Image (cartoon, rainbow, N blue to C red):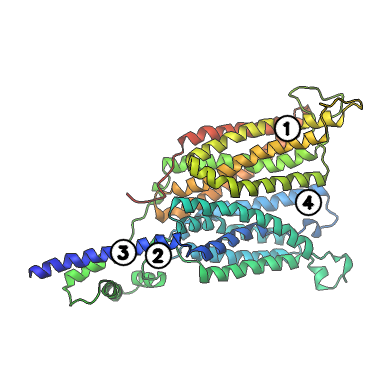
Amino acid sequence: MPADSNASPNLIFDGDAVQGQRCASEVTAVDGGVFKPQLLILMLIRMTESLASSSIQLQHFDPSAPPATISARAGIMIGAKTAAHVCTGLIWGRLADWEYCGRKAVIVFGLMASSISILGYGFSQTFVMALTCQILDGALNSTVSMTRCVIAELNPQKRHRARALTLLPLFTNTGHLIGPLIGGFLVSPDKQHNTRSFVSKFPYAAPNIVIAAFHAILALAAIVVVKETLPTQHSHLGSLRRAWARLGPRGLSDRTVREEVVDESSRLLGHQHAETPALSESVASPETAKPATLRFSQIWTFNVVATMAVYFLFHGHSGAFPSLWAIFLSTPVSSTRQQKLSFRLYGGLGMNPRGVGTVMSMQGAISVITQVLLYPTLNDWLGTIRLFRTGLLAFPVTYFIAPFPALVSFYATNQPSNTSRYAITEPCVWVSVAFVLLLYVCGRTGVAPATTLLINDSTPHPSVRATIHTTATIVSSLSRSIFPPIALGMFGHGLRIGFVELGFWFLSGVATLACLASMWVVEGDNGIEG
């Protein structure tokens, strides 16, 4: 009997040791790069979101429609897709946290739904049909937040998680570059074809077919390659088996679950003699016990709310600046009799479309370089929270000085013929523009990945991680639908009253609020239970 009494604790201790070895091997596997194929698929999935809806022209539905009508329809279409995602995003987050669904199922379903929606979008012949497809795409697709969630869970170590999440903006920018190229090369205007031909009837179908096929291929790849990362699905019992165990006849389901658990325990612990029912229950109970979960009301801790508030303000001003900047670049230079050396600016830089494109390409190039070379080093040196707060400080300064290249452009354009060697010339305009872009990109390089990390680490429990990420996506969508129209409206009013910097200084105020709110944000523990 003494030998037997010592045997049981040793068996349980050995079982814990095996489980510990399993966890250690999982961390080692992540460190060793076993999950690289999964990361590649997830990055490509993120890129597809930038490809979608980039190859259709609203004017095709009504060639006689004026530009104002087309612009209004474009705004309606973008806003409808965003609103649809805001309405359903939290539902997908809760489904991804549900043990009978999971992250992988939401990703695969979203990709297939997007594939069908994009096909319908490409074959649309009316604005209503195109709008319906966009609403369906926004309502049924939550892959952006799910890819962030899964990437964070595949990289439990903070250093690797930071580097993996840094790759997301690179693939997003790649999608923004490739998408318009696909649309430009594959679109087939009907001027060159018979009006009764298929190409003439659906001139924008080809690029959307390619993008939809890409979504479908990635959905199949996700089924094969991507593993489920939901903690409650790490058990050897599958989702369908656990659903049957819960919904089936109680006696049969309990016996089935117990037999599977005992069989699994036997393989882990080695050959052993028959145990008493009490010992079998003690071995089975750790496996069958349901992992702890949080109620919906317990998710919204102070740190989660503070992080979401900063995320709302950050995406509001950083999302509005590119549109405001592009319009400012093309706004005509102020006349000689209006402009004086003062804080009141009456015009922009007067660039042609090629010049605007060059500036935006310059911004993209600087972003890629700083994201790859600068962010990892700064993150290791300063840490996530300090880099986050330091990067936020760059935006109020950037937006405050952003309109003043117009003053440089004014003096470069209206330079007298007998200029001195220190006169303002055209290169001075480009230097001033590059300086503004450098400040903006450096701030965004430090803040954007750090914000994603802080949102992930603010998760109060692993069982609600997908809910946190989908909430962040909803917050981002709301801010991008609120702040850009306000900033553009203030810029237009500033043009009328001779105060162009009004829109930029509004963004500077929003960025200052984000800096103040960041003081209440702390670095979480990634939902690790104490």
Question: Label 3 vs label 4: CA separation?
Answer: 60 Å
Residue carrying label 1: 403
Task: Determine whether 211 is above or below 467 in the image.
Answer: below
Looking at the rendered image, the disc whose residue lies closer to the viewer, 4 or 1, is 1
Q: Disc number at residue 272? A: none
Q: Residue furthest left?
A: 1
Question: Dot 2: within a 10 Å radius of its alpha carbon, few (fewer than 14), some, or many (20 or more) residues?
Answer: some
Q: Are marks 2 and 3 in contact (CB under 8 Å)?
A: no
The type of residue carrying mark 3 is Gln
Q: Write the residue at 34% across / 69% down.
A: 246
Question: Label 4 vs label 1: CA separation?
Answer: 29 Å
Along the polypeptide, which appears first: circle 2 or circle 1?
A: 2
Q: Are marks 3 and 1 in contact (CB under 8 Å)?
A: no
Along the polypeptide, which appears first: circle 4 or circle 2?
A: 4
State whether residue 408 appears in this view: yes
Residue carrying label 3: 19
Q: Are marks 2 and 1 in contact (CB under 8 Å)?
A: no
Please tell me whether mark 4 sits on a helix, a strand or a loop.
Answer: helix
| Horizontal side of residue 408 vs 264, given as left or right | right
Along the polypeptide, which appears first: circle 2 or circle 3?
A: 3
Q: Write the residue at 10% across / 69% down.
A: 3
Please tell me whether mark 3 sits on a helix, a strand or a loop.
Answer: helix
State whether residue 477 appears in this view: no
Instruction: State the image coordinates of residue 166 (x, y, percent, origin top left).
Output: 55, 51
Along the polypeptide, which appears first: circle 3 or circle 1?
A: 3
Looking at the rendered image, the disc whose residue lies closer to the viewer, 3 or 4, is 3
Instruction: State the image coordinates of residue 460 (x, y, percent, origin top left).
Output: 40, 48
Instruction: State the image coordinates of residue 5 (x, y, percent, origin top left).
Output: 11, 67
Looking at the rendered image, the disc whose residue lies closer to the viewer, 2 or 3, is 3
Residue carrying label 4: 70
Comparing 501 with 415, the one in front is 415
